[in-house]
Amino acid sequence: MRASMEQSVRTEADGVVIRRALVVDDSRLQRRILTASLQRWGFEVQEAASGDDALRLCRETPPDLVMSDWMMPGLNGLEFCREFRQMARDSYGYFILLTSKSDKEEVALGLDAGADDYLAKPFAFEELLARVRALLRRKSESKSPILKVADLELDPISRRVSRQGKSIRLTTKEYALLEYLMRNPGKVLSRTLIGEHVWDMNFDPESNVIDVYISHLRSKVDKGFDVPLMHTLRGQGYLLADDSQQA
């Protein structure tokens, strides 16, 4: 039993490697429902009733996947996510916030705190599994070599980004957006494609969330450098390319 708890589960379901999960919710019923579903999919699951308990479990056994309710007494899901990211330094674990909040500003707040995805209650468990597949697939892809576009570099393993040797600090969602752009250099990526691949949710085309993140990313990637790499094609989408690729 001890050996099995110290190793990631190697079971595969639909081509996805299954690993440890942590369910965090002050509702025992909600925890049990999520735990039962995750166990059916092959996860080893731990439960926590608060953000404080969850942090303690994360220190003892780093999870590959965290599903946390937002509204909890004490350390809430948003605060827990921030603490988790600070502790993990983005080196492990995907984080999904489960909440009844639906305001786009609230969604952006959760993503800025370090959440990889956001799922509004009530949700279908099939949708939850699809999100988990997408996150684990992204983890598998992160083993690729260093990505380079002109003088911009991204290391998927250390999650470090630099340009001309100068380190660029990004939020979790800014990093995910840049990684997607750098895996598709010179390609025009529509808002719908970006929403599906980076946010892993049914993206609302009326939302300006992607525009906001593109603007933040452009200020960090291009500001202070002679050659702009991030480009907007009105009515089509966005792309990452140097001037020679724009010809």
Image (spheres, rainbow, N blue to C red):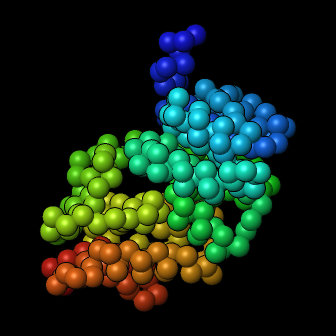
Location of the N terminus (image quadrant):
top right
> Which quadrant would residue 121 be assigned to in this image?
bottom right
Whether residue 33 is visible: no
Identify the residue at horizontal 52%, vertical 57% (top origin). Answer: 114
Quarter residue 166 falls in: bottom left
- Of residues 240 and 162, the one nearer the viewer is 162
Q: Quadrant of the C terminus?
A: bottom left
Residue 9, placed above or below residue 124: above
- The x and y percentages for residue 209 are 55, 76
Toward the viewer: 101 or 13? 101
**Measured from the top left, where is residue 214 in percent x and y?**
42, 77
Q: How far across and down, in percent of the image, does residue 117 sit?
A: 58, 56
Would you say 231 lies left or right of 5 here?
left
Marks counted in the figure total 0
Is 184 on the left or on the right of 152, as rendered? right
**Percent position (x, y) of residue 5?**
54, 19
Which residue is situated farthest in the right direction here?
29
Q: Is residue 225 left or right of residue 119?
A: left
Query: Can I make out residue 238 in this image?
Result: yes
Q: Is residue 245 above or below residue 166?
A: below
x 50%, y 75%: residue:
210
Residue drawn 22% across the image and 52% down it: 146
Q: Quadrant of residue 176?
A: bottom left
Left of 179 or right of it: where is 190? right
Residue drawn at point x = 73 percent, y = 50 percent: 74
